[in-house]
Image (cartoon, rainbow, N blue to C red):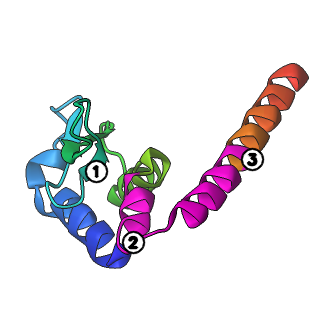
Amino acid sequence: MFKKLVCLAVGTLAVGSQAFMPSLPMVKISSSAAARVYQPAQSETGLRVPVSTDVMVSVGDGENIDNAVKRFKREVNKSGHLLDLRFHRYHETNQEKAKRKAVQARRKARMLRLSLRKGQKL
């Protein structure tokens, strides 16, 4: 499923010939199927509502298409909505959810520490 969604999004990028025209300074690339994320609703009902996530990639004049696709894939992975879809594919118990969130929090804290350390070396 993950490969299908990425291929769908990359296909959207490659098919639109207008996306690689040098006259366009910013290209907005999104796929309605791949860009839909389910987040908790703001109401008291507790229902989940679809929220669209747009991934933006700016394509420079004469930039290689492969580089643009690589940057698009990187942005899709950094946005995290495909990872979220992967976790929502099957039911996850509260214990599994707590374990996953603890691992994510540790990873996020580690990345923050590493980025601060890199910032101090500059």
**Which amino acid type is marked by label 2?**
His
Q: Residue at x 9, y 47 (%)?
A: 18
Q: Earlier in the sequence, mark 2 or mark 1?
A: 1
| Relative horizontal placement of residue 15, taking residue 6 as reference (left or right) | left
Numbered range of the magenta stretch: 81-106
Return the residue at label 1. 37
In the displayed structure, would residue 15 be above or below residue 28?
below
Return the residue at label 2. 91
Is residue 7 visible to us here?
A: yes
CB within 8 Å, label 2 to label 3: no
The quadrant where residue 119 appears: top right
Question: Could you tell me residue 25's position as x and y percent?
Answer: 23, 28
Q: Quadrant of the C terminus?
A: top right
Q: Earlier in the sequence, mark 1 or mark 3?
A: 1
Question: In the current view of this chain or complex, which residue is farthest to the front?
Answer: 44
The image's mark for residue 66 is none
**Which amino acid type is marked by label 3?**
Arg
Seen from the viewer's position, the closer of residues 30 and 57 is 30
How crowded pointer 3 is (Cα within 10 Å; few <14, some 14-19, many 20+) is rated as: few
How crowded pointer 1 is (Cα within 10 Å; few <14, some 14-19, many 20+) is rated as: many
| Relative horizontal placement of residue 67, taking residue 6 as reference (left or right) | right
